[in-house]
Each structure stands twice: as structure tokens, then as C-alpha cells.
Image (cartoon, rainbow, N blue to C red):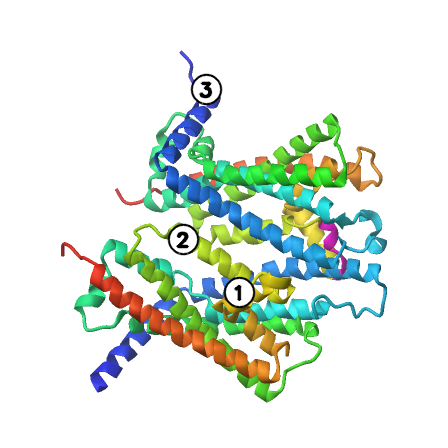
Amino acid sequence: MRTHPSYLRVLLTFARNSLVRDMTFRGNFLIETLSSMSWVIMNLGFYVLVFQHTPRLGAVTDWGEYAFSWGKYEFFLFLSTTLVINSLVQTLFMENASEFSELIRTGKLDFALLKPIDTQFLISLQRVQWASLGNLAVGVGLAAYSLVRLGWVPTAAQVGLYLLFVACGVAIMYSLMIALAATSIWLGRNQSLYDFWFYITNFSRYPMEIYHGPLGTPLRLFFTFIIPVMVVVNVPARFLIRPLVPQTVSDLTLPAFAILATLVSLTASRYLFQRSLLSYRSASS
Amino acid sequence: MFARTSTWWTILRISVEERLVYRGDFALSTLMRFLPIVTQIFLWWAVFSAAQSVEPGNGATRIVGYAYHDFVAYYLLTMISRAFSSMPGLASGICRDIREGTVKKYLVQPIDMLSFLLLYRIAHKVIYYAVAAAPFALVFYLCRDFFPAGWPEPQILLAYAAALLMAFLLGFFLEATIGMIGFWFLEVSSLLFIYMLFSFFCSGHMFPIDMLPGVWGELVRLIPLQYLAYFPAAVFLGKVQGPELIAGLWIQFGWVVFFIAASRVAFALGVRRYSGFGG
């Protein structure tokens, strides 16, 4: 007899159950998909407006080591990478993480702890939010459109590296989210989880080159090396946009650092999660 | 008359005390709310430095009449506008009351729902300003360089105060009217989301609506959302002046009156449709 469950099969069951649940309320599913897509399209509209007034982001001359300027379609490729990563995080983890603080508050975490499966796995992936995949489609569509407009065909190696670092980005975002959720065990309730999440990941939404100067450089270093949200989108996006020829030192060190950051984030958040479980005291009953 | 005043006074006092329970959390979250502006500061700096390198000049590049510091000042000022006009949970709260039947309490008790909610909001807002004043002052002090013109003239400040006050009233009655939709539809969360989206985009919270080209700009100027964020900020920055300013204030006033009436009518019609069951 097997002593541990097949995680893949459990995951597929979660995904299927969520899909069944979503399809029970099809109208609601459609509205959810459309409303999150319209949010994205409005954002896109903002950047279209911005690029009517400037040909690119940042002056080429004074960036030094990080010299790279983002034209309209290069920035749209960046934006599509943000969309892809965020929609994956939302589809897989977002709802589960916010559910987690609710489990703690109501004491329902007991049931998760009793199940013969890794608790972090269970509470992280229980519910798949299929409606958020609409944004993934927008992201892929935008990327394809931008590549056509740039007249640029990435090689298979570039796409492979892109996907690898998108996965790293998702893992870093997940680690941050689960670490934030774990703090709700100590705080009892964590209503501002979403807010906090939004404020931190806000720094991943723009190319890191824009953070520059006496305030910008410390910010860039902090959100790269202490809380690594800036490598989440920046690293994969670069692989898609530029030829695979390293031009600066950071072209090599940054991806290497992204891999390291992924491993450290996953380990640290796992540790934090396990530690927080030790402090769980159930509720009522 | 006296009994009535004392009722309202009690409602106001209870709401004030309720709000003060979480004041620490509150001041911190206010400060956090400025974080997205940091990214905006850098984004616009990147935009302006690129625009400048295209047409090198003396650094006086302007986009739709806004210099770099105007953009940052604008975003900071919309934070103040939103502090007045945003009504978190108002429309959804009304809808929930209707759906769950708790709206009954306003129907059977001698209390007018809209007045009660208004007082409740006023209490929350007053406490909000008292607690948020320090973080706001800190941020504006740190960002004082983005306001090279300093304080505007007294009459502009007066107009600004009027615009903010009306932004509060407009925000309240507009959202309350939207909340009344709950009498006709049971599930409104997605409708509210779409309204929120439009409001974010068209009120000028996301960017100054001067950036919208041609017919889009004209359309957005026709609807009342701009008075929630854009208009007060534009008044402070001197983007609307003279007769235009006076006309703007009157139009804003007109919208306030319109939505006071609309919310009353919607409530009266809604109550006629409403049926309450159980105890």
C-alpha cells in the first residue's frame, strides 16, 4: 500500500472540481472573466495613452550599466509577461491564500491538518480559479501582437528560457503570497493581505531601469535583492525581447540571481509556513 | 426637533467611536496607500526623460500642459480628492442590506436610511482625516518640491475646498444611487466592479483626463465621474481658472443635486418593490 498520495492526481482532481463548480454558474464565470479582462484592457489603454506622448520609457544615455530603453512594443511585451505571471498566480494561488486566513479565523484549518497530505500543498492549490485564465489569453495575445509589430521572431531557446523564468516568477510571487498568508496565523486576521500584496508587487510592474537616482537605486536594490519582486517580470521579459547574446554583466548575473532567488524564496516561505502552523491554536469547538 | 437632533448626534458619536477602535492600523494603511505613487513618480520620470532626449531643451517638456512635477503633484492631489469622494463599501453595503433583508430596520424605525448612512460616512470621514492628517502631511512635506508654485491664492483654495466638499457629497449620493440597484437585481457585485473600474479610469484617478484625445476626452468630461478626483486636483493646480472654474463648480453642484434626487427617487421606488419576510 502506498503511504503517500499521488500529488499530481490530487492536483488534477482539485482542478477538475473547481472547473465543475465554475461551470455550474456559467453566467457568473463569464462575467468574472470579462470583468477581470476589462480591467486589463483599461490598463492597456493607459499605456497606449502614455506612448502617444513619448516614443519610449527612459532616456538611453544615462542608464549606465542597465542601459536599455523600452519602446512601445517592447514595453507591451513586458506588460504581457506581467499579465501572464499575474494571471497564473491568480488562477492557482490567489483565492487559496485569501481563503487561508479565513480558515485560521474560523478554525477550519483543523480539517486541513488532519488530511494525510502536505498541508501547504493542500491549502495552496485547493481551488483553481479558472476565470483568471482570461487574462493569460490577453497576455499571450498581446505578446504575439507586439512581436509581430516589432518584426521579431524569438528562437526556441529564447522561448524555453522565457517559460523557465516565467515559472520562477510565479514561484517567487507564490512564496511571497504564502509568507504573507502565514503571518495571519500570528495576527489572527489579515484583512490587508490583498492590499499589502498589491503594494509590493506594484514594483514588479515596470521595467527596473526606471528606478534610478538617489531614491530609485536603493529601491531597485531592495526590491531585487531583499524582496525579489523585480526579477519576477524583468528577467523573463528580457529573454524574449533581446537576442541571446549577453551584452552586459547583468545579463548573466541577473538570471542566475533569479534562479537563486526562486530557490531561497520557496525554502524561506516553506519554513515560515511550517513555523506558523506550530503557532496555530484552532478556534472555538 | 430637539429629539431628532440628539438622535443624529448619537448616531454620529457612535460611528466616531466605532471608527477609532483601529486607529493604529488605520494610520499605517494610509501611509501604505501612497506606495503606488512611488512607482508613478518613476514611471513619469522615465516618460519625461525620454521625451526630453527626443526634443532636447531646457527641461521644460510638457505633456498635455503638464510638466513632470505637475504630474506627480496631480497624483498626490487625487489622493486627497479620493479621500473625500471614495465611499468604500457603500453601494455593496446597501445591496447587502436589501438582499439579506436588514434594510427592514430603516423601514420600521423612524430613521431615514440615507440620512443615517450619510451621518455614518461623515463620522468615518472626520475620523479618517484626523488620523490620516499626519501621514498626508508627511508625504506632502517630503514631496514639496513637486509643488514649485507653493500654495495657490486664497480664492483658489476656497474653490478647492468647495470642490472637495462637493466631491464628498457627489461620491456619497452617486454610490448610494448605485446601491439602490439592489432592489431590482439580487447579485450586483460584478456590476459594482465594472462601475469601480469606470470610476477609476474616468474620474482621473489613474491619469489626468486631459490626456484623453478627441471625442474620448469630451465624453469623459460629460459624465460626473471627473468631479470625484480630477476636478478638485485640477482646481488646485490652476488648470481650470476664471469663468471655467465657476462653471465647473456649478456643474458639480448640479450633479450633487441630481444624485440627491436620484437616490431619493430610487429608494422610494425600490421600497415599493421590496417585500420583507420573517422576523
Asked whether A61 falls inside the magenta stretch, the response is: no
Which residue is identified by label 2?
B191
Q: CA distance from mark 1 to mark 3?
A: 51 Å
Amino acid at circle 1: Ser
Q: CA distance from mark 3 to mark 2?
A: 41 Å
Amino acid at circle 2: Leu
Secondary structure at badge 2 equals: helix
User: Going 68% across and 45% down the picture, which residue do you hit?
Assistant: A76
User: Going 47% across and 31% down the picture, which residue do you hit?
Assistant: A121
How packed is label 2: few (under 14 Cα within 10 Å), some, or many (20 or more)? Answer: some
Q: Which residues are magenta?
A: A208-214
Asked whether A210 falls inside the magenta stretch, the response is: yes
| Left or right for A284, reference B86 | left
Secondary structure at badge 3 equals: loop
Q: Chain of mark 3?
A: A
User: Which quadrant, please, contains the C terminus of chain A?
Assistant: top left
How packed is label 3: few (under 14 Cα within 10 Å), some, or many (20 or more)? Answer: few
Which residue is identified by label 1?
B203
Q: Chain of mark 2?
A: B
Which residue is identified by label 3?
A6
Q: Give the mark nearest the N terminus, 1 or 2.
A: 2
| Left or right for B105, reference B140 | left
Question: Residue A147 at x, y = what percent?
Answer: 71, 38
Q: Quadrant of residue A9?
A: top left
> Looking at the image, which residue sits at the far front?
B215
- Nearer to me, A99 or A271: A99
